[in-house]
Amino acid sequence: MVESVGGYDYEFVTNLPEDLTCVVCHFALKNPVQLEDCGHRFCKECFDQMKQHAMENYLELSCPLDRQQIPNGHVFKDKATERTILNLSVKCRNFGEECTWIGELREALNHGANCPKNAPRGNEKFAIELQQILNGMAELAAKVKSSEGKVRANEEKLKISEGKVRANEEKLKISEGKVRANEEKLKISEGKVKANEEKLKISEGKVRANEVKITANEKKNCR
């Protein structure tokens, strides 16, 4: 249950002691803070409103009970008092109507949601359940839409990837064609080399034959 600004507005089983009551809102202290110098306590929200009022009106911040000035930083959270207040027994806000709940204040803060007085009935309950179903459907539709968006994005990425694959395949075909062309050129070059080697052998044979003839002629002339 969300509390209003100020203290706890509950009916206590026993009379609330004066020192546990906020002098600003006159309810049980909620998140109490205590002044270091004079010892008076306030709800934190009430004290914050006092500070805001003083600032907006260019006034000195002072205790409303004894008018003592409150120096900056001379305020602290009163945890002990907070525990004392939360331990006190209170009645449900719907007590006497359709609820007989009595318990500690700390439990009352969560009781409201389970209080029979606040429980939805008949058409109200159906309307709540219907709204929950509609909210669930809307949430599901939003998830489906988000998923479809992701699917479309992935499809676009897939198309781009497939385009890159096809482009690489074309480049590969061109490279393979160049390799085959170079292999053909290499074969032709190797054929020419072999042909030149054959011609060289023939030329070397002719040279040796001529050298033999020259040698034979020189021997004849010497005789």
Image (cartoon, rainbow, N blue to C red):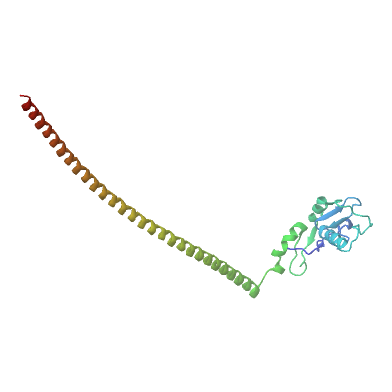
Where is residue 91 shown, x and y percent of the image? 78, 63
Q: Is residue 111 above or below residue 126?
A: above
Q: Is residue 166 above or below residue 135?
A: above
Count numbered badges in the picture: 0
Where is residue 173 shown, x and y percent of the image? 33, 55
Q: Quadrant of residue 14 in the image?
A: bottom right
- Residue 177 placement, left or right of 71: left
- Residue 53 placement, left or right of 195: right
- Residue 180 placement, left or right of 90: left
Q: Quadrant of residue 192 in the image?
A: top left
Q: Quadrant of the C terminus?
A: top left
Foreground residue, 66 or 154? 154
User: Which residue occupies 84% across, 54% down?
Assistant: 33
Where is residue 57 shown, x and y percent of the image? 89, 63
- Residue 171 placement, left or right of 198: right
Q: Quadrant of the N terminus?
A: bottom right
Whether residue 200 is visible to the viewer of this picture, yes or no, is yes
Foreground residue, 106 or 219? 219
Whether residue 15 is visible to the viewer of this picture, yes or no, is no
Foreground residue, 51 or 57? 57
User: Which residue occupies 26% across, 49% down?
Assistant: 185
User: Which residue occupies 35% across, 58% down?
Assistant: 170
Where is residue 44 shown, x and y percent of the image? 82, 57
Instruction: Give the farthest residue toward the bottom.
Output: 123
